[in-house]
Amino acid sequence: GPALLFVKTSQGKEEGRRFYACSACRDRKDCNFFQWEDEKVSETRLAAREEYNRNHQPFFTHRQNMDRYKNFVLLPLSKRRFCQECQQLLLPAEWEKHSDHQFLCDITTARLKSPSQLLYPLENKKTNAQYLFADRSCQFLLNLLTDLGFRRVLSVGTPRLHEMIQSKASQEEEFSVKSLLLDIDFRYSQFYTEDEFCHYNMFNHHFFGGEAARETCRKFLYEENGERVIMVTDPPFGGLVEALASSFKKLMAMWSETEKEGRDNKEMPMFWIFPYFFESRILDFFPSFSMMDYQVDYDNHALYKHGKTGRRQSPVRIFTNLTPSMIVLPEEEGYRFCTVCQRYVSSGNQHCEICNSCTSKDGRRWKHCVLCKKCVKPSWFHCNNCNCCTLQKHSCEKADLGCFVCGKAGHKRSACPSLSRT
Ligand code: SAH
Ligand code: ZN
Ligand code: ZN
Ligand code: ZN
Ligand code: ZN
């Protein structure tokens, strides 16, 4: 799909030079596409690129994978193999080719219904960053959105939530929630039909399946029989917020366009799962969003998972455009309702009388600084040199330097709020 246009800025220069690079891979090792914006590309180079792309297509198409799946489920258990090296379901005629690969046998129907357990997580930090929800968090999300009355879930980069919905729907008759998975991980095309999974890049809103896939998504967003839609997304945390926001706005627009009469400027309901320190970036793009205190836990993330002894604090939160008071957080996990703020907060999050708000972002109890006129992390102290609260161990000059772009203190160039508008 399309590349993204970036800008290389160098210190002291007004304008940087613009270039195109891969939208999905932030590591040049994964994709080395690079082109200056004003660069003229020769016919030979174009042809070489097309050749490269042709040679790097997945071995089977989504349609072929579906046919293979149909044949696979007809096999007796003893003949159902999954190649761990190729991450692929094998038909008996293919065993020979994979004879020196590790494989799993006796793939039951139950295992086919939880592909996220069968496939290994692609943890490559800069591209896939596949961190799967802990069961507790996934269950919480699902209960929350069904309690809120949603019957359709657009799962953008949330394969485990999609999987939980799909398997519940196939097991329980009265459970009538539908899900459509949009994800860049094409391995999922082995397990889901074209109505259940679209190969999609959320950094440039690209549907690899073309117009047909786009139409699948559009149809899904059309709220037939009053089945209300919510989008849930859990992007890689290293992703560019502006690129994600731009794609999500396009998905929102797709939803708005499904209603001829218009939707009175209403937004498609959304849960964007992301670390709390991105709050201001997300609010820049979606002013209607607010951050919930719920801490989202993961299975395969060393830092963000539930420890054996007590819980480690996860920095990952839910951002939503739904009314905060409707997002009920579990009291058995220590969350409580603040009647002043009209939202559920962490047990450690104390309502500050001066700020008139529950100010903690990380779950710990924050303290109010009268000089800064706001609440700050418990580990911070007011530094009279820097004229703000910061860690006790810091060098005062550093804070003076400020941002290269706007010159203001408190953030680096990469997080400069004035960049978001260019
Ligand atoms: N917690 C979620 C998984 C989040 S990990 C769950 O348990 O369901 C991030 C997800 O985003 C992965 O599934 C990954 O394959 C997908 N992803 C990564 N880059 C993407 C991109 N550019 N476009 C679409 N999906 C992407
Ligand atoms: Zn193999
Ligand atoms: Zn409060
Ligand atoms: Zn305060
Ligand atoms: Zn202070």
Image (spheres, rainbow, N blue to C red):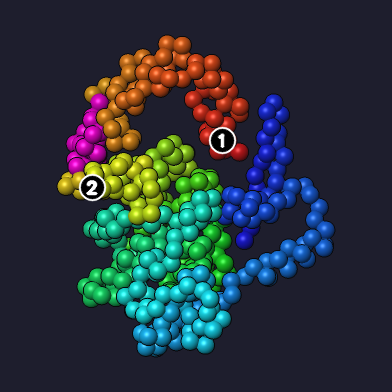
Q: Gap between marks 2 and 1, in whole Å?
A: 33 Å
Image coordinates of residue 371 in percent, x first then y, are 36, 14
In this rendering, position of residue 62 left or right of residue 45 = left
For the residue pair 101 and 127, the one nearer the viewer reads as 101
x, y (%) of residue 33? Answer: 68, 54
Q: Does residue 376 appear in the picture of this structure?
A: yes
- Give the quadrant of the C terminus: top right
Residue wearing tag 2: 329
* Image quarter in which the N terminus is found: bottom right
Q: Where on the picture, by quarter, is residue 311?
A: top left
Q: Position of residue 302 (x, y in %)?
A: 38, 48
Residue shown at 31% from the left, 75% from the top: 110
Q: Amino acid at mark 1?
A: Ser
Q: Is residue 339 magenta?
A: yes
The kind of secondary structure element at disc 2 is loop
Q: Which residue is mark 1?
A: 414
Q: Which element carries disc 1, helix, strand or loop?
A: helix
Span colored in magenta: 334-352
